[in-house]
Image (tube, helix red, strand yellow):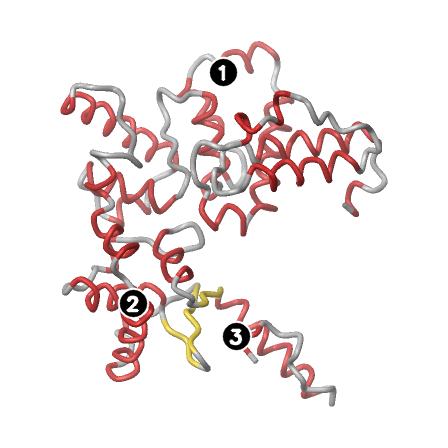
Amino acid sequence: RGVLSSCPASVKMLAAEMMWLLLLCPSNVSIDRKRETIKTIWNWSENQFPEQSRWLSDTVLQGIGSGGPGFSNHRPRELAFCLAFLLAFRKLPQDERTKLLSNSWTFAEWLQQVPDAQARQFRHMLLYLLFPDDFERVFSAGDRKAIAEHFAKLSRAQTNGMAAVELDKVLRKTRDDLEQKYQTNKLDFYRAPLKELWQSDLTVLETALTADHVKKAIAEIDQEGVPKDAASSTYDLVQGDKRYPPKLVLSLAFKHAAGKELPRHDFAGGEDTWAFRVLRQLGFSIVPKKFINDLVDRFLAQANGGQDLRTSDYPKEYR
């Protein structure tokens, strides 16, 4: 709100409309939460909120696909990308805008040039909204890669090295092949018969994996140690006063649940991945390494300055 406090009412209403666009796709944000967020921003303008607008109806706001926890955790970055896209598009001559909107792949190539496009889920959402025949309602980077790896027989190294638009083309070719195979264009990667094919291991994770399996994996790591190639450079799973590589924990937990270890190169780690979602749903905390380093620096600064060393305002998993 502070950024908009000195802006005219029209800018505040525009910000509310941008938030509407940003929240249009995610189905894992409730309708009431979406409407309340949009209304809060609009009310900063002190103009009457259009409660009865059809664009704020339950049908419009129900969403079309999950954005995953990464979308909510990185919403400021998603909003910044949305703004960067709108500004870049608005600066184009009218005929160039028309040309871009008339060709899905030309638009996707142009969108790839907007800063941070590679990492943002809103990029995938926008392309699906504009060109649903060429792009999938798959917004999670982890799921996009998993689908391509299963059906197109690509390795994780290959999908990790692809630009977002390259992966889009793989997914489009995959859909063409599957439509030929099943003789229908009514296919969805999150519904039968496709879901069971690429999410077979995920089904085990979401139905059979328990917190006890994860604890057994942690105990195994305590006993055997962390292999050199399994160390995590970005995130830690925190259990008590110890830290563990989340993907290694999940891989070993899968072994205890299903009788076989899940190869770490077969799945992604990160904020918007099902791997982290499963671990968090089971009650385990996963945090960025930088977050932990910041806590250490903060405590040391208190100690060096002779300040009160109580940690009551620290996140509870570190107290």
Separation of disc 3 and disc 2 at Cα? 20 Å
Left or right of 206 on screen, residue 139: right
**Amino acid under label 2?**
Leu
In front here: 2 or 27? 27
Give above or below for 310 relative to 261. Answer: below
Q: Say whether disc 1 or disc 2 marks the residue closer to the N-terminus.
A: 1
Residue at the far bottom: name it. Answer: 306
Left or right of 269 on screen, residue 229: left
Q: Nearer the viewer, mark 3 or mark 1?
A: 3
Q: Residues within 10 Å of mark 3 (few under 14, many from 20)?
A: few
Badges 1 and 2: C-beta atoms under 8 Å apart? Answer: no
Circle 3 sits on which residue? Answer: 317
Residue visible at 47% across and 21% down? 130
Residue visible at 68% across and 23% down? 52
Q: In the rendered image, which quarter is residue 269 located in?
A: bottom left
Q: Residues within 10 Å of mark 1 (few under 14, many from 20)?
A: some
Circle 2 sits on which residue? Answer: 248
Circle 1 sits on which residue? Answer: 101
